Image: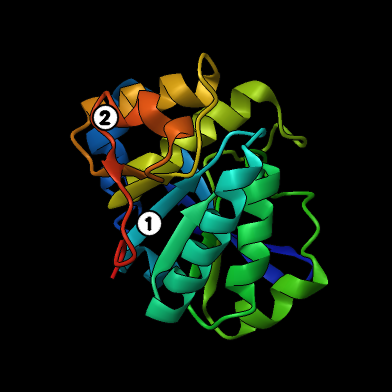
Amino acid sequence: MTFRKKSGREIRKIQSNDPGYPPVLHEYLDEDVPSVVTAIGDMGLLNTKLIGFFCSVKCPGKLIIQVHDLAHELGRAGTTVISGFHSPVEQECLRILLRGTQPVVICPARSMEKMRIRAEYRKPLDQGRLLFLSPFLDKPHRTTAQSALRRNYYVAALANQIFVAHAKPGGKTEQFCYDILKWRKPVFTLPNEANEHLLAVGAKPAVRDIGY
């Protein structure tokens, strides 16, 4: 492992042959496995049960309240949530989770070399309940559609269970869900007519005790 400083925080560079490298990445990503991952925070959070959280950029309003309720439930349960927290619904859930005490893993779809650590992240980092983990080393410095998609597969590989609040029919998130279902990982979604296309192909209806 090597270390570099970023705004007083250590950025750990973990090679794929390092003992600290997450082994599940080799298991699920095959030739797409990143040769290096970078981290800021406590890597021990990866040893907890991880719920991967995803939502399309556009989400029906009737689902948003249900997603917020589930985020509060996960927070009360102390469940570790891992996500890119990029779409509007994902970002709102991150705000809910950070107000709690449970662990959170944020996976940026970009290099962390020039990434600014926001003020609201500093306390949970100091408390050891927030981890930044990226599959990108030196670039890109901004999130792209391609890097976001690659990041999503990375998150799904790390997660024990997957929760998809909504995947727009015909969109990239829907195709992503189909691919993850082939991995035989548990995939959950909200039981709503807006998600019938996901339930029809094998996603399970999310219940209140998901992630407990």
Marks 2/1 in contact by CB < 8 Å: the verdict is no
Residue 145 x %, y %: 66, 23
Q: Viewed as shown, does residue 199 lie left or right of 135? A: left
Q: Please name whichever residue, 88 or 159, is drawn nearer the observer in this view of the structure.
A: 88
Residue 67 x %, y %: 53, 55
In the displayed structure, would residue 74 be above or below residue 169? below
Measuring 48% from the left and 32% from the top, which residue is drawn there?
194
Q: Secondary structure at mark 1?
A: strand
Give neighbour class at mark 2: few <14, some 14-19, many 20+ (Cα, 10 Å).
some
Quadrant hosting residue 146:
top right
Measuring 35% from the left and 59% from the top, which residue is drawn there?
50
Instruction: Indicate which disc residue 181 carries.
Output: 2
Q: Viewed as shown, does residue 58 lie left or right of 97? A: right
Report whether residue 157 is seen: yes
Residue 169 x %, y %: 51, 19
Q: Secondary structure at mark 2?
A: helix
Measuring 37% from the left and 43% from the top, which residue is drawn there?
191
Kind of residue at disc 2? Leu
Q: Please name whichever residue, 26 or 175, is drawn nearer the observer in this view of the structure.
A: 175
The Cα–Cα distance between marks 2 and 1, rounded to whole angstroms, is 15 Å
Q: Please name whichever residue, 38 or 105, is drawn nearer the observer in this view of the structure.
A: 105
Residue 198 x %, y %: 36, 28
Mark 1 lies on residue: 51
